Amino acid sequence: MIPEVVNVGKDNGYLSVSYGNIVSILIESIKELNTKIEGLEQENKTLKTDVNTLKNQMKTVLDTIKLI
């Protein structure tokens, strides 16, 4: 999964994991996810505003139709 943190033993060829090296990768991944979350939150806020605008416009149209 993360080849940078896998080590091969010189004597026996066993694989081991350098967990200390995973920390920096995880921190960068978390930063990237937070950036994506912030973007999605902003998009969600914009979409909610658009939906409310459309609801109000639809109400106006329906009220106008009722008057006809």
Image (tube, rainbow, N blue to C red):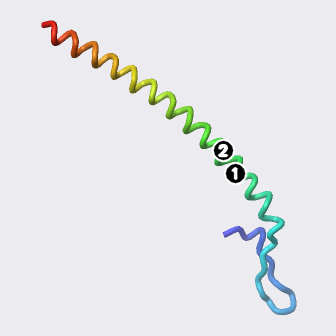
Q: Give coordinates of residue 61: x percent, y percent.
A: 24, 14
Q: Please say if 20 is above or below 32.
A: below
Q: Give coordinates of residue 36: x percent, y percent.
A: 61, 43
Residue at 83 percent of width and 66 percent of height: 20
Residue at 49 percent of width and 28 percent of height: 46
Tell me which amino acid carries mark 2. Answer: Asn
Neighbourhood count class around disc 2 (C-alpha, 10 Å): few under 14, some 14–19, many 20 upward: few
Residue at 78 percent of width and 75 percent of height: 17
Q: Please say if 62 is above or below 27.
A: above
Cα separation, mark 1 vs mark 2, equals: 6 Å
Is residue 53 shown left or right of residue 45? left
Residue at 77 percent of width and 68 percent of height: 4
Q: Is the N terminus in the top left, top right, bottom left or bottom right quadrant?
A: bottom right
In the depicted view, which residue is nearer to us: 66 or 32?
66
Q: Most extreme residue toward the top, as rendered? A: 67
Return the residue at label 2: 34
Is residue 36 shown left or right of residue 44? right
Tell me which amino acid carries mark 1. Answer: Ile
In the depicted view, which residue is nearer to us: 35 or 49?
49
Neighbourhood count class around disc 1 (C-alpha, 10 Å): few under 14, some 14–19, many 20 upward: few
Q: Most extreme residue toward the bottom, as rendered? A: 12
Task: Say if mark 1 contacts mark 2, CB within 8 Å.
Answer: yes
Q: Give coordinates of residue 52: x percent, y percent.
A: 40, 23
